Image: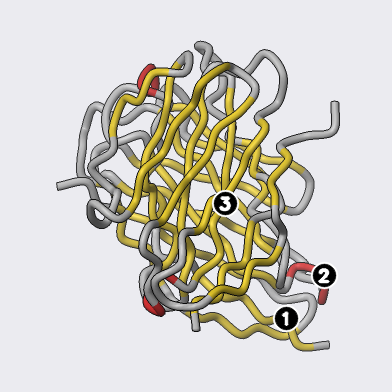
Amino acid sequence: DAGVIQSPRHEVTEMGQEVTLRCKPISGHDYLFWYRQTMMRGLELLIYFNNNVPIDDSGMPEDRFSAKMPNASFSTLKIQPSEPRDSAVYFCASSLVWAGSNEQFFGPGTRLTVL
Amino acid sequence: GENVEQHPSTLSVQEGDSAVIKCTYSDSASNYFPWYKQELGKRPQLIIDIRSNVGEKKDQRIAVTLNKTAKHFSLHITETQPEDSAVYFCADTYGSSNTGKLIFGQGTTLQVKP
């Protein structure tokens, strides 16, 4: 398996533009997580899905952020409109939760810069 | 609330010395405690984890200890090497591990000086 795949790897956009980040989890995994990482706030959980259903979106900063998982192999995180304070590295992770392990496998991340 | 306290935020050691990073969790129902390592510009990756039914787990130069009474767990790295330099994150499940969710600590930047 290629692991968790994210695209794009880098995104530079201007304030007010819509940004869409994409994630393909590891095949067979039943959980998908979106994180944001900044120096100031560390690694923040934004939202996570179980079997394509959003379970907890309490970490989504505001209504400008939305996430979808239309099927087991694809998820998107959208920011509309984007703001400079959204600049961060966004990670997608997936896991297969069973009694022995909750290991999350992270993708390479998308570095977002909003000018 | 959902919170994992991690200390110290930075740690500098000489090559060959030991390093210890500590985390404190809040929910006594938490039962899974992983440690992730993130090298500069890379993704976080699991290096070791422990479940609540054991007090210690070792894997070569790294070990994790768990004190359920005090609700804290620690990462121990012995004979540190320059390649151990990275940011280390602890995490807990804030309750049952069946939710799949992890709450991460703020991270510890470890620098191993050659």
Cα gap from disc 1 to disc 3, whole angstroms: 27 Å
Q: Position of residue A82 (x, y in %)?
A: 40, 67
Disc 3: which residue:
A91
**Looking at the image, is mark 2 or mark 1 earlier in the sequence?**
2
Compare residues B46 and A18 and report the one nearer the observer: A18
Snapshot quadrant of residue B76: bottom right
Cα gap from disc 3 to disc 2, whole angstroms: 23 Å
Compare residues B60 and B8 and report the one nearer the observer: B8
Q: Is residue B88 above or below residue B65?
A: below
Q: Position of residue A52 (x, y in %)?
A: 47, 18
Question: The residue under label 2 is which amino acid type?
Answer: Glu
State whether discs 2 and 1 lie on one chain.
yes
Disc 1: which residue:
B112
Disc 2: which residue:
B83
Total count of labels:
3
Q: Are marks 2 and 1 in contact (CB under 8 Å)?
A: yes
The chain holding disc 2 is B
The chain holding disc 1 is B
Q: Residues within 10 Å of mark 1 (few under 14, many from 20)?
A: many
- Secondary element under disc 2, as helix, strand or loop, is helix
Q: Is residue A2 above or below residue B99?
A: below
**Is B68 situated left or right of A82 in this image?**
left
Q: Residues within 10 Å of mark 2 (few under 14, many from 20)?
A: few
The chain holding disc 3 is A
What residue lies at 39% left-to-right and 18% top-to-bottom? A53
* Nearer mark to the viewer, of 3 and 2: 3
- Secondary element under disc 1, as helix, strand or loop, is strand
What residue lies at 64% left-to-right and 67% top-to-bottom? A11
**Is B11 situated left or right of A3 in this image?**
left
State whether discs 3 and 2 lie on one chain.
no
